[in-house]
Amino acid sequence: MALLPIVTLPDPRLRKISVPVSQVDAELHRLLDDMLETMYAAPGIGLAAIQVAVPKRIVVIDIAKTEEERAPLFLINPEILWASEELSSYQEGCLSVPDYYEDVKRPARVRVRHLDRNGQAQEFDAEGRYVEARFKQLSVISVYMPSGSSSPERQEAKYRYLDSFLPHLIQLKKSGREIVLRGDVNIAHHEIDLKNWKGNVKNSGFLPEERAWLTNLFGKVGYVDVYRKIEPEAGEACYTWWSNRGQAYAKNVGWRIDYQIATPGIANSAQNTSVYKTERFSDHAPLVVDYDWSI
């Protein structure tokens, strides 16, 4: 890999129109690697090809704070499919405008389609769905997985998300770290995990393909559903989400779609678990697990 010179304002090359990439090959891989190395050395968290005088539609991103946490994202021919009307403001800088920072308002959420490093089409919603905190050999991950209930298109996007997220979970497990992933998975695994399972077998959140994804995760891949490890027979007490329609919460017509998913080592240290309902914060209730684990 080589460090590339970063073009800075007022260099007119920054105003060139970038063209789409026509072929993902070894030459493009070298450019991606060089861009990534250049971005890390700058240091920065994002770099476009035009910033190294290559007018092609390529962006590399990595928001990791340490070298050990690096997880680069390669966006080839990125295209914004949708942007929310809600805006968020963040202080931003640019490697092509050195030593200048300003608050910038952008859409709080966007949906992006692109090719990845292997030339495979990908689509994702950039809305802060994944946060990982590392404590020595333990990773605690907070995640929100998409819902597909609003339309068939969103269900297809959900399937694409699951397909792309599974390899990441497999890689995490292979790293040897202990993992606790907690959050809204938006899938009820078994009939015992929701009140009205017969009426939802064709609805997002309880579709056979979604449930099979969890079965594979807890089976072949080797993660553990910590709640079910401790409470294998719990029925209505297990629910963590209730629709805002009707009197679902009052009648406890709920779903168990919030999980703590862990690697076997730390899962075996789980002592007890409960769903906290003393106070109601939203349509979800917190899932609590006590681990006998030293950090």
Image (spheres, rainbow, N blue to C red):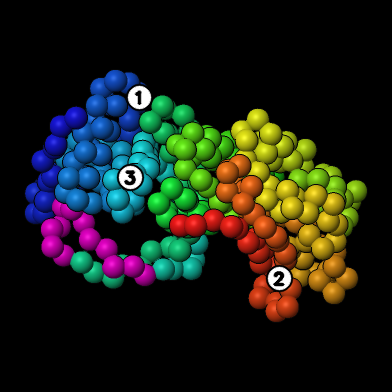
Callout 2 amino acid = Tyr
Residue interval drawn in magenta: 89-100
Q: Earlier in the sequence, mark 2 or mark 1?
A: 1
Residue linked to disc 1: 24
Drawn side of residue 254 relative to residue 92, left or right: right
Pair 2/1: label in front: 2
Q: Residue 276 falls in which quadrant of the image?
A: bottom right
Residue closer to the observer: 78 or 165: 165
Pair 3/1: label in front: 3
Callout 3 amino acid = Glu
Residue linked to disc 2: 276
The residue shown at (81%, 45%) is 190
**Residue 65 at x, y = what percent?**
31, 54
Outermost right residue:
198
Residue closer to the observer: 127 or 167: 167
Residue 156 counted in the magenta span: no
Q: What secondary structure predominates along the stretch shown in magenta?
A: strand
Q: Is residue 219 above or below residue 153?
A: above
Drawn side of residue 179 relative to residue 245, left or right: left
The residue shown at (70%, 79%) is 279
Residue linked to disc 3: 68
Q: Earlier in the sequence, mark 3 or mark 1?
A: 1
Secondary element at image label 3 = helix
**Residue 154 at x, y = what percent?**
64, 48
Secondary element at image label 2 = loop
Number of numbered discs on residues: 3
Q: Residue 152 falls in which quadrant of the image?
A: top right
Mark 2 touches mark 1? (CB < 8 Å)? no
